[in-house]
Image (cartoon, rainbow, N blue to C red):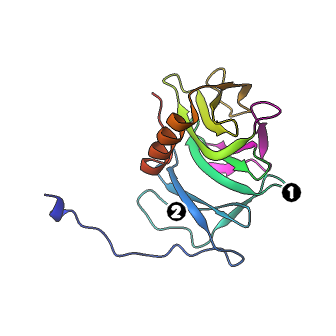
Amino acid sequence: MADKIKWSDWASLGKPDATELGRPFARSNQDGRLEVFAIGLGGIFNIAQLSPNGLWRDFWRDKERPSPTVSIQSHVASTNADGRLGIFAVGNDNALWQKWQVAPSNGWTEEWKTLGTPVRDTSLTEQFTVGKNQDGRQEVFAVGSDGAVWQIWQTAPKRRLERLEEPWRAGATAAAARIALLSETTQTGARNCS
Protein backbone atom coordinates (compact mmCIF):
# COMPACT_ATOMS: atom_id res chain seq x y z
CA MET A 1 0.00 0.00 0.00
CA ALA A 2 2.79 2.44 0.87
CA ASP A 3 4.33 2.06 -2.58
CA LYS A 4 1.04 3.28 -4.12
CA ILE A 5 1.23 6.70 -2.43
CA LYS A 6 2.38 9.21 -5.01
CA TRP A 7 4.21 12.50 -4.46
CA SER A 8 4.63 15.50 -6.73
CA ASP A 9 7.97 16.61 -8.08
CA TRP A 10 9.90 19.16 -6.00
CA ALA A 11 8.90 22.79 -6.65
CA SER A 12 10.63 25.93 -5.37
CA LEU A 13 8.82 28.61 -3.37
CA GLY A 14 11.79 30.88 -3.97
CA LYS A 15 13.27 33.24 -1.41
CA PRO A 16 13.41 36.96 -0.73
CA ASP A 17 15.95 38.80 -2.88
CA ALA A 18 17.93 40.03 0.12
CA THR A 19 18.51 36.77 2.01
CA GLU A 20 18.60 33.01 2.12
CA LEU A 21 16.08 31.32 4.39
CA GLY A 22 16.42 28.75 7.14
CA ARG A 23 14.32 26.57 9.41
CA PRO A 24 10.94 26.64 7.61
CA PHE A 25 7.88 25.97 9.73
CA ALA A 26 4.36 25.42 8.30
CA ARG A 27 0.93 25.96 9.84
CA SER A 28 -2.64 25.90 8.44
CA ASN A 29 -4.73 29.05 8.56
CA GLN A 30 -8.30 28.80 9.80
CA ASP A 31 -9.49 29.03 6.17
CA GLY A 32 -7.36 25.99 5.23
CA ARG A 33 -4.49 27.76 3.45
CA LEU A 34 -0.98 26.66 4.43
CA GLU A 35 1.48 29.34 5.53
CA VAL A 36 5.25 28.85 5.83
CA PHE A 37 7.49 30.86 8.16
CA ALA A 38 11.29 30.91 7.83
CA ILE A 39 14.19 32.81 9.39
CA GLY A 40 16.15 35.29 7.26
CA LEU A 41 18.15 38.45 8.03
CA GLY A 42 17.48 37.86 11.74
CA GLY A 43 13.71 38.11 11.24
CA ILE A 44 10.82 36.04 9.93
CA PHE A 45 9.63 35.84 6.34
CA ASN A 46 6.40 34.12 5.32
CA ILE A 47 4.62 32.87 2.23
CA ALA A 48 1.06 31.50 1.97
CA GLN A 49 -1.19 29.61 -0.38
CA LEU A 50 -3.67 31.75 -2.34
CA SER A 51 -6.45 29.22 -1.64
CA PRO A 52 -6.70 25.92 0.27
CA ASN A 53 -4.77 23.18 -1.58
CA GLY A 54 -3.91 25.81 -4.19
CA LEU A 55 -1.07 27.80 -5.68
CA TRP A 56 1.32 29.87 -3.60
CA ARG A 57 1.79 33.62 -3.45
CA ASP A 58 4.80 34.48 -5.63
CA PHE A 59 6.70 36.49 -3.01
CA TRP A 60 7.80 36.26 0.62
CA ARG A 61 6.59 38.89 3.12
CA ASP A 62 8.93 40.29 5.75
CA LYS A 63 7.61 39.95 9.32
CA GLU A 64 10.80 41.69 10.44
CA ARG A 65 12.81 41.15 13.60
CA PRO A 66 11.67 41.91 17.15
CA SER A 67 13.81 45.06 17.32
CA PRO A 68 16.77 46.57 15.44
CA THR A 69 19.12 44.97 17.98
CA VAL A 70 17.37 41.57 18.38
CA SER A 71 17.68 38.78 15.79
CA ILE A 72 15.55 35.64 15.81
CA GLN A 73 17.43 32.43 16.58
CA SER A 74 14.56 29.91 16.70
CA HIS A 75 10.80 30.03 16.10
CA VAL A 76 7.56 28.06 16.03
CA ALA A 77 4.07 28.92 14.81
CA SER A 78 0.91 28.17 16.77
CA THR A 79 -2.85 28.59 16.57
CA ASN A 80 -4.77 30.66 19.11
CA ALA A 81 -8.17 29.55 20.50
CA ASP A 82 -10.02 31.78 17.99
CA GLY A 83 -8.07 30.41 14.99
CA ARG A 84 -5.47 33.15 14.55
CA LEU A 85 -1.90 32.09 13.88
CA GLY A 86 0.91 33.30 16.10
CA ILE A 87 4.69 33.22 15.85
CA PHE A 88 6.81 32.64 18.94
CA ALA A 89 10.56 33.25 18.68
CA VAL A 90 13.65 33.22 20.87
CA GLY A 91 15.93 36.10 20.02
CA ASN A 92 19.67 36.57 20.40
CA ASP A 93 18.76 38.42 23.62
CA ASN A 94 17.64 34.96 24.89
CA ALA A 95 14.09 36.21 25.53
CA LEU A 96 10.78 34.98 24.10
CA TRP A 97 8.98 37.18 21.56
CA GLN A 98 5.59 36.87 19.85
CA LYS A 99 3.64 38.25 16.89
CA TRP A 100 0.10 37.24 15.83
CA GLN A 101 -2.62 37.63 13.23
CA VAL A 102 -5.10 40.44 13.90
CA ALA A 103 -7.95 38.25 12.58
CA PRO A 104 -8.09 34.56 11.60
CA SER A 105 -6.31 34.07 8.24
CA ASN A 106 -5.82 37.83 7.88
CA GLY A 107 -3.15 40.44 8.69
CA TRP A 108 -0.45 40.56 11.35
CA THR A 109 0.40 42.86 14.25
CA GLU A 110 2.92 45.52 13.32
CA GLU A 111 5.25 44.99 16.28
CA TRP A 112 6.70 42.04 18.13
CA LYS A 113 5.88 41.80 21.85
CA THR A 114 8.33 40.38 24.38
CA LEU A 115 7.46 37.77 26.97
CA GLY A 116 10.89 38.18 28.52
CA THR A 117 12.90 35.52 30.33
CA PRO A 118 12.04 33.29 33.31
CA VAL A 119 14.13 35.08 35.95
CA ARG A 120 16.93 37.61 36.00
CA ASP A 121 19.81 35.12 35.86
CA THR A 122 18.13 32.57 33.56
CA SER A 123 17.91 33.10 29.82
CA LEU A 124 16.18 30.92 27.25
CA THR A 125 17.90 28.55 24.85
CA GLU A 126 16.72 27.92 21.29
CA GLN A 127 14.91 24.76 22.48
CA PHE A 128 11.22 25.50 22.97
CA THR A 129 7.77 24.46 21.85
CA VAL A 130 4.18 25.71 22.09
CA GLY A 131 1.18 23.60 23.05
CA LYS A 132 -2.52 24.23 23.36
CA ASN A 133 -4.51 23.02 26.36
CA GLN A 134 -7.93 21.43 25.95
CA ASP A 135 -9.59 24.74 26.89
CA GLY A 136 -7.61 26.59 24.18
CA ARG A 137 -4.99 28.27 26.38
CA GLN A 138 -1.54 28.32 24.80
CA GLU A 139 1.46 27.22 26.83
CA VAL A 140 5.14 27.68 25.97
CA PHE A 141 7.79 25.24 27.26
CA ALA A 142 11.44 26.27 26.97
CA VAL A 143 14.79 25.02 28.19
CA GLY A 144 16.54 27.68 30.25
CA SER A 145 20.25 28.35 30.63
CA ASP A 146 19.94 26.66 34.05
CA GLY A 147 19.02 23.35 32.34
CA ALA A 148 15.42 23.35 33.62
CA VAL A 149 12.27 23.39 31.52
CA TRP A 150 10.37 26.63 32.08
CA GLN A 151 6.76 27.28 31.15
CA ILE A 152 4.59 30.33 30.58
CA TRP A 153 0.87 30.23 29.71
CA GLN A 154 -2.26 32.18 29.01
CA THR A 155 -4.37 32.40 32.15
CA ALA A 156 -7.56 32.06 30.08
CA PRO A 157 -8.30 31.29 26.44
CA LYS A 158 -8.38 34.69 24.78
CA ARG A 159 -10.34 35.88 21.83
CA ARG A 160 -7.46 38.28 21.34
CA LEU A 161 -3.96 36.85 21.59
CA GLU A 162 -2.09 39.02 24.02
CA ARG A 163 0.99 38.66 26.15
CA LEU A 164 1.08 35.30 27.84
CA GLU A 165 0.80 35.68 31.56
CA GLU A 166 3.82 35.33 33.80
CA PRO A 167 5.35 33.97 35.94
CA TRP A 168 7.59 31.54 34.17
CA ARG A 169 7.76 28.29 36.13
CA ALA A 170 10.56 25.73 36.27
CA GLY A 171 9.82 22.11 35.48
CA ALA A 172 11.73 18.96 34.48
CA THR A 173 15.45 18.33 34.26
CA ALA A 174 17.51 19.45 31.29
CA ALA A 175 18.17 15.95 29.94
CA ALA A 176 14.52 14.94 29.92
CA ALA A 177 13.52 18.32 28.51
CA ARG A 178 16.01 18.20 25.66
CA ILE A 179 14.91 14.69 24.67
CA ALA A 180 11.22 15.64 24.79
CA LEU A 181 11.67 18.96 22.99
CA LEU A 182 13.92 17.52 20.30
CA SER A 183 11.52 14.65 19.69
CA GLU A 184 8.43 16.89 19.59
CA THR A 185 9.99 19.63 17.45
CA THR A 186 11.58 17.18 15.02
CA GLN A 187 8.38 15.20 14.53
CA THR A 188 5.74 17.91 14.48
CA GLY A 189 7.31 21.32 15.00
CA ALA A 190 4.88 22.08 17.83
CA ARG A 191 3.24 20.08 20.55
CA ASN A 192 -0.51 19.76 21.01
CA CYS A 193 -1.25 19.38 24.72
CA SER A 194 -4.93 18.52 24.42
Residue 105 to residue 149: above or below: below
Residue 17 to residue 70: above or below: below
Residue 96 to residue 14: above or below: above
| Residue 79 position by quadrant | top right
Query: Which quarter of the rendering shows the C terminus?
Result: top left
> What's the CA distance linking mark 2 and mark 1?
33 Å
Residue at 52% from the left image edge and 26% from the top image edge = 133
Residue 186, magenta (yes or no):
no
Instruction: State which region is magenta.
Output: 95-122
**Where's residue 143, x and y in %?**
63, 38
Q: What amino acid is labelled 1 in the image?
A: Thr
Q: Residue furthest toward the left?
A: 1
Q: Is residue 100 visible to the viewer in this orientation of the structure?
A: no
Which is nearer the N-term, disc 2 or disc 1? 2
Residue at 67% from the left image edge and 45% from the top image edge = 125
| Residue 53 position by quadrant | bottom left
Task: Kindly check if marks 2 and 1 are in contact, taking CB atoms under 8 A apart as contact.
Answer: no
In the image, taking residue 56 as reference, residue 68 lies left or right, namely right
Which residue has dot 2 on it?
50
**Where's residue 66, x and y in %?**
79, 52
**Where's residue 63, x and y in %?**
72, 58
Nearest to the observer: residue 158 or residue 183? 183
Nearest to the observer: residue 79 or residue 95? 95
Nearest to the observer: residue 142 or residue 179? 179
Residue at 66% from the left image edge and 74% from the top image edge = 16
Residue at 21% from the left image edge and 62% from the top image edge = 5
Q: Secondary structure at mark 2?
A: loop
Q: Name the mark nearer the viewer: 2 or 1.
A: 1
Which residue has dot 1 on it?
69
